[in-house]
Image (cartoon, rainbow, N blue to C red):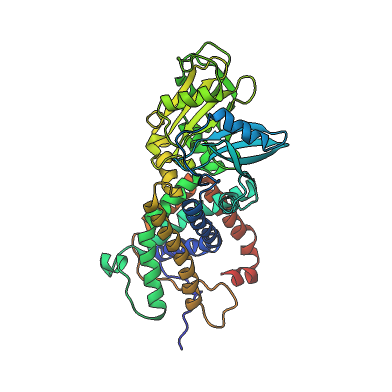
Amino acid sequence: MTMTNTQAQPEGGANKLYFAAWRWHFYAGLFVIPFLIILATTGMMMLWIAWVDGRDGERTIVVPKESTMAVALQSEAAVAAVPGGTLKQYVAPRRAGLAALFRVDADGDATMVAVDPYTAQVIELFPRRSGWYDFFDNIHSDLMLGVVGDRMLETAASLALLLVATGLYMWWPRGGGWRRALVPAFGTGRALWKSLHGVGGIWASIFLVFFLISGLAWAGIWGGKMVQAWSHFPAEKWDNVPLSDDIHASMNHDRREVPWALEQTHLPASGSGAGITGITGAVTIDSVDQLARAIGFDARYQLNLPLGKTGVWTLSRDSMSTDSTSPTTDRTVHVDQYTGKILADVRFEDYSLAGKAMAVGIALHMGTLGLWSVLVNTVVCLSVLFLCVSSVVLWWKRRPANARRLAAPPMPNELPLWQGAMLVGLAVSMAFPMAGVALLAVLALDLLILSRLPKLRHSLT
């Protein structure tokens, strides 16, 4: 059997640049593949748990009757079920025949109480964010490592964009034309795996890039420090409304609940004469609920109670929280806790272009647009898993049988537009800081350490 020398250096400047681009694809893949497997697997689990069983008990079934009890009576029953508890949130049922949910906090713990809205009887209690959905969500968002995990995933997602760019460059149609690039050639052995990996990659690339970028928008550096900072809703649009020191993100609780476009926007403050007429009588949970229904919050919506002396009642509905299946119906309304006046009313059309893109993008990313989006996302997750597995199979089939090193595959002879690929890789690194940091770290390792240790460098190449 003839073995290819995987260490042979290509001839010519163009070959060397192509070889460098290919090496980034190979070694970036070594880092990225485990994270992509984790993200695809946990994402798929979250999709189906949310669709089949709901995320937080919102599908608890009750027997519908002619009329419902007052929300105040329901909330009193919920608070009574949690000794020493304080009511924090009311989640209206999605439709008739489902329980109402109340969040009650006690001793630093948040408990969800499912109440029959027709009888005001407590059905069940369970710790908030304690289900299987949240278990997978915690892994998907930060590997259960907090900030460290967030940075690791941001680095992996950023490098995955470089992986996609270099992969498309290497598989870009040349000798075989577009048919070869888009339709797999069903042969045998390594040729079959190469064709399946390349064709699968080119079809999945559009979806994968979308998922990576929409996920990065939630990440701490690129999302929080760069994109979100200049694209959030400007609170200055609320004319003559006093602002709180707290931002909307303070309303999140172990999960992103506030629309992305509002997270960094300051909340309005209660206690002034600002706002427009909302509630004309006493401001209670019942009157706030009646206001919500009167101004268009039908079916499921969330009502957050005021926090502190300047806190506001907050009515919200968004597809990210599965309140609806259309991000264009997103709406957040703040009501003064003393006067009942509406201080702010933010809708989808008020978002910036980036905010609108994220509202739609998050709904697509999370598969909250209905069964079709769950099925499409499942196909994407399975495609990512296949690309990860097939890349390992390709490496295994290409490496020499007696190799004791990583044994990168041999260099292709064909040379497509390497300049474009290199520029794309550079652009990805410049646009996404964590990718740039990772690449600089590898270059520093190569120049400062591996270049001075020939034997160690040989074992890694």
Which residue is painted at 59% across and 69% down in the image?
460
Given residues 298 and 40, the one toward you in this image is 298
Which image quadrant for residue 78?
top right
Q: Is residue 247 above or below residue 384?
A: above
Q: Please identify the quadrant where the C terminus is shown.
A: bottom right
Q: Is residue 428 above or below residue 386?
A: above
Which residue is painted at 54% across and 30% down in the image?
71
Residue 234: tell me if it is visible. Answer: no
**Which residue is the extreme one toward the front?**
66
Which image quadrant for residue 2?
bottom left
Given residues 409 and 114, the one toward you in this image is 114
Q: Residue 419's spot in the image, x, y percent?
A: 37, 56
Q: Is residue 436 above or below residue 113?
A: below
**Which residue is the extreme one toward the top?**
273
Which residue is painted at 54% across and 64% down in the image?
30
Total residue callouts: 0
Which residue is painted at 50% across and 27% down in the image?
289
Given residues 250 and 76, the one toward you in this image is 76
Q: Is residue 154 above or below residue 9?
A: above
Residue 121: tell me if it is visible. Answer: yes
Q: Residue 236's spot in the image, x, y percent?
A: 48, 20
Q: Residue 370's spot in the image, x, y percent?
A: 39, 49
Given residues 118 and 143, the one toward you in this image is 118
